[in-house]
Image: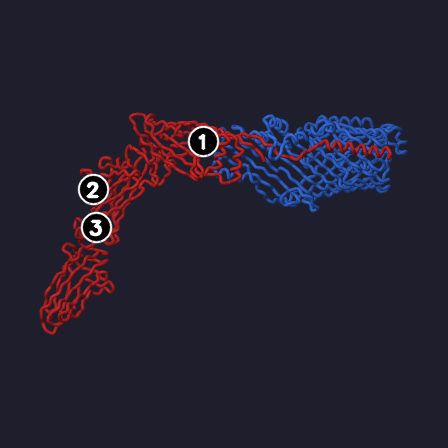
Amino acid sequence: MINILKLLFALLLIFIFSINKLYAQNFINVRGLAMGKTSVADSYELDAFNNNPANILKQKSNNNATVYFSAFLNINYNQNSSYLSTSFYNKYFTGGTAENPVYLSEKDKQDIINSASGEPVYVFANLKDVSVVYNSENSGSFGLSLEEKVAGNFILSKDFLELGLYGNEINRVYDLSGVSHNAAWVRQLNLTYAKNFKIKNNNLIDNIAVGVSVKPQFGQYYTTTQKNNLSVTTNNSFEIQGNGQAEFLFSSTSEDNIPTATFKPAGFGFGFDIGMNADLKDVSEYGRLNLGLSVNEFGYITWTQNTNKYFYNGNFLLTDITNKEQRDSLNEIIKNTKTVVPSFTTALPANIRLGLSYKIFPVKNEIALKNKTLETATISIEYIQGLSNNFSETTASILGIGGEYNISDVFCPRTGFSFGGSQGFVFSLGLGVEAGPVMIDVGTYNLSGIFNPNSTSKLSGAFSIKFKIN
Amino acid sequence: MNSKSYCLILLSIIISVYFYSCEIKEPTAPEWDVNLNLPFTSKSYDIFDIIKRSGNVGYDSLNNDFVYLYGESDYERKFGEDIKFDGYPETNINALTAVQFDTSLTIDDSTFILKADFLNGNLSFKFLNSSSDYSVRASIKNLFQNSDNDTARIDANVNTNSPTIINLNLENYHLKNSNPDNTLKMRIYFQSASQFPVSFSYELSEYSIKTFEGRLKPLNTGISTDEVLDPFGSDVPEGEINFASISPNKNFIILKKYSDLYQVDFANISLIGENKNGNRVRLKYLKYGNSGDPVDSVFTLTLASGRDSTAFPMNQDNSNILEFINNIPKKIILVRNDILNSSYQNGMVKYTDSLTIKLQIQVPLDISITKPIVFSDTVDAGISDESQRKELDNAKNLQFSLITENRIPLKAVSKILILDSAFNTLLAISKIVGNQPDSTVTVNAAPVGVNGFSNNVNTTVFSAELDSAQINLLKQMGKVIYEYKLYTDPNLIPPPLTTVKISGSNLIKFTGFGKLKYRINF
């Protein structure tokens, strides 16, 4: 067993050092968010949706509820960039009035360029409209969750910002290809089933829970930069030449491609999660080690409604701005060409999670299990590998380590840290409160944001209120 | 309330405070200034653009694209009723009745007709009274009715003491002889109960012919005056151009006739060129078109009967063509007197025949301009789009540069004014750029090589700065007046040359650009 742990630890170290490009991963689990983004091996009931479907049958050691549910009280908002804080936004985009707007000084412009050039901004929000888990005594656990997921990202290149804020310099090529965006709003129905299996005659595994989720996807809105190789050159004769093209792909519930809430989706597809959680034997007398593995968000959405491409032809030559034909030609280029395109399919942001969690009990394992004794603490470690760049996900990896300490059966502070994502190293913090049938969780993976939320550009907050019925 | 409930309330308060502290305000877009490096113009002009014409300007691609100016004045004359004869006076003839006889009635002393159709005219007979009644039966054997080609006939009764007049409208007849003749051949019979003497007279009125074949007596068709406007195009500039020479073998007076006409003498030709200022110069040429003749401002040219056309070459030895062209006529007036068949030969003429005299002039732009030629133009200009006018409010400052690269060996002094629709001056652009008291800018001529063509470029740079108030005036822009004067610069012409040669491939290029400080707001 120790050898296996060593092997796993060694593998995790390799993963840590192989991470060379760090991006955010969407994380829609309040408890796991506070615990260094770990959840595959240690999440419970409603928190297990989208992370490891096997875990919906897991509960805290001292709980044995039949039903867990939540309605409109599970919210998660993550915004991640190196510069776009509330104070940044307020300083430059809210400081004045329409009649007397904020004037950007040279210092302001330089500050914006230094801050925003080439830095992606990721935004992810999730609201669980309704979530229910029903634990059957013999048939396993059944879960249902209806969720709204909004994800988006954009990036502004240095050349784009300098062109926009300073104007065009002569003898310079402005490469605008670094500007891109991607945004989606998907309503997801999650139908999950999980069952626990006792493993007999096995020295390693005591029992194993497996789960599967089938997730119909109702796409509400999608847009992405499909192509952008625009560039603008000003030569020493002051002639301005544009080259390249930009194409933006849209699908939405409205003809004018404005996000609109409706029950008639713009796209439809399916997603699938599958996962397992194994209780490992003989690790310690006072603790239990769990191994979790899940593959999530495997699937697609086919966008069929109002599928449009907006095309910008950036090829122009401006040699005489007083020439009406040239001006008109430029205006025509600035106007986009909207064309209807066939339906298209986007992959869901699939990811693989692999992790370990270790629960420490105040008494021996057998006694704790028998008496439903609350664990003193939980420590977990997890590796997350994204397989897609869609929906603000990336293919870069994250390694998280977290812990939860149960001060009493009411309060359980959580903390952790993770490597990876656009934040690099982040320290996360959260709190769980269990007040009888009501369970409240809050969490963030940006500690400084707690004390000064206006100045943080890595805004992270998750909040949920869940209810249980024994 | 138990401890769990307190915990719940406390946590709710903490969360509320936390999220409230993250204050997100209503967005308002900021504004900022950008410096836009913009091309305002990049245009090249050749001499054809500058003088705004191409119809009367060409170039010789085999000779450095040497530009030449050409003009043509074409005077055509159709005869119509101008081939006119005086007719024949009343002539008496005596005869006896009851006897048939033949007689000839002379219709012209010197014109012998083989065939003639008439446009007008009258042949009238007057049969006088006598002591007894009689009748007349006559035929004119060489005069035929147009309607049926039947011989012209007279059939009339003459009563005592009452003369009978017979009129033949020649418009309805044609005359035909087997040999040219100047008489009407008449067979006449006076029928009466007894023989007695009778008399009659005939008279031919003035008449014009439609077609004539035979030997025409020399016919003066009279003085005609004609004028041709804009032989060098409608935009003939003011000023004085001195051309160094004319194009060899390209300048002619061309006489042309349309039909096998008799010899035509274009007599007493006077060609007067009048320029824009009313100054007149008469073209002088060889007195009779023959070498060795004296040069005169009134001359006669002959187009022989056997030729359709004849071109009389003009050069600086046999005419004052250079003086005539240097005046750059806006109008050329031609006065002349055409004489048909002065050689008194057989031939033919129709009333539809015409004569043409054409003056063809070509002169290369090998010139000196001492008094500038001036071109001016007023064009409608303005920013009609309200949103575009409003955008000018955001323009704070414009640093403007204009580079001229002149390869044309002409110096230009230009003035550009921007006015409102009521012609009030808003901006004297040329004054801002050139900073001269007369509001002009000068673009120096290109240097000239020993062959007379420009051999280098002359570059001039102008810079100016417009503030926001001046830029704002452009919103009221309604007209732009361009005026430019062209000179040759003696200082750039290598001796012994005094003129410069203009090539069609010589260009003047204007490149205008500037840095516009512009406020972006939304």
- Residue beneath disc 3: B221
Q: In the image as oriented, which residue stretches furthest toward the left?
A: B196
**Which residue is pictured at 78% across the width and 36% down the height?**
A464
Label 3–label 1 contact, CB within 8 A: no
Cα distance, mark 3 to mark 1? 62 Å
**Which residue is pictured at 36% across the width and 39% down the height?**
B54
| Residue B67 marker | none
* Residue B428 on image: x %, y %: 43, 32
Q: Quadrant of residue B161?
A: bottom left
Q: Earlier in the sequence, mark 1 or mark 2?
A: 2
Q: Residues within 10 Å of mark 2 (few under 14, many from 20)?
A: many
One can see residue A119 in this view: yes
Do marks 3 and 1 share a chain?
yes
Q: Nearer the viewer, residue B165 or A210?
A: B165
Tag 3, which chain? B
Tag 2, which chain? B
One can see residue A11 in this view: no
Callout 1 secondary element: strand
**Which residue is pictured at 61% across the width and 35% down the height?**
A98
Give chain B's shade: red
Callout 3 secondary element: strand
Q: Earlier in the sequence, mark 3 or mark 1?
A: 3
Q: In the image as oriented, which residue stretches furthest toward the bottom?
A: B193
- Residue beneath disc 1: B511
| Residue B299 marker | 2
Cα distance, mark 1 to mark 2? 54 Å
Quadrant the C terminus of chain B occupies = top right
Q: Amino acid at mark 2?
A: Phe
Tag 1, which chain? B
**Which residue is pictured at 89% across the width and 29% down the height?**
A364
Give chain A's shade: blue
